[in-house]
Amino acid sequence: MSRLWLLLPVALAACTPAAPDPGVEQAHAYTKEVTGDEIKVGGLHVRVNKAIADGRHVRISGTVENRFAERVEGIRYTVIIAVPGDPPRVVDTVREEVDTTLDPGEDRSMRVEIENPTHASASALFNIVATPVTLGGRAMPVPDGW
């Protein structure tokens, strides 16, 4: 049980905004190339409310918000897991696609479950990147590694 409380503060701190997501930038470039339009606001913003480890799974829940000016249909979550260090070392990447639909400005609950005994029982850092499957009815590029 004490590991659960150790993981939560570290996990929440690890989910602070990171460097610009190359997947989102790819989506912007693709949209401009296909439609000629710039995306004026953008991105899918993930907020983690809770991360629970039970020794076999890490269950992450929170919300995802559509900050694009267009409807998002389908979301690809990439969870990057790292161990603390200077710099942190990436030890695993988990990918999951869900059928969530979000209108501009809308947010919905988000859940990702990772089954990995090694990382589910140790204090690990993680970052969640969310990219749209389709944006405004147009297919978006698949993120690297999918």
Image (cartoon, rainbow, N blue to C red):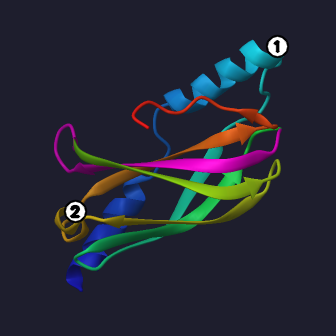
Span colored in magenta: 70-89
Between discs 2 and 1, the one toward the N terminus: 1
As drawn, is 52 to the left or to the right of 99?
left
The mark tally for this picture is 2
Q: What kind of secondary structure does the magenta stretch mostly adopt?
A: strand
Which residue is the extreme one toward the bottom? 1
Residue in the image at 69% along x and 53% along y: 65
Mark 1, Cα crowd under 10 Å, few <14 / some 14-19 / many 20+, is few
Q: Which residue is mark 1?
A: 36
| 24 relative to 107, above or below | above
Quadrant the N terminus occupies = bottom left
Quadrant the C terminus occupies = top left
Residue 64 figure quarter: bottom right
Residue in the image at 82% along x and 39% along y: 70
Could you say whether the residue bearing mark 2 is in a helix, strand or loop?
helix
Mark 2, Cα crowd under 10 Å, few <14 / some 14-19 / many 20+, is many
Q: CA distance from mark 2 to mark 1?
A: 43 Å
Type of amino acid under label 1:
Gly
| 51 relative to 77, above or below | below
Q: Which residue is mark 2?
A: 119
| 72 relative to 140, above or below | below
Residue 133: % across, % down: 64, 41
Residue 72 within the magenta-colored segment of the rendering:
yes
Residue in the image at 32% along x and 61% along y: 10
Type of amino acid under label 2:
His
Could you say whether the residue bearing mark 1 is in a helix, strand or loop?
loop
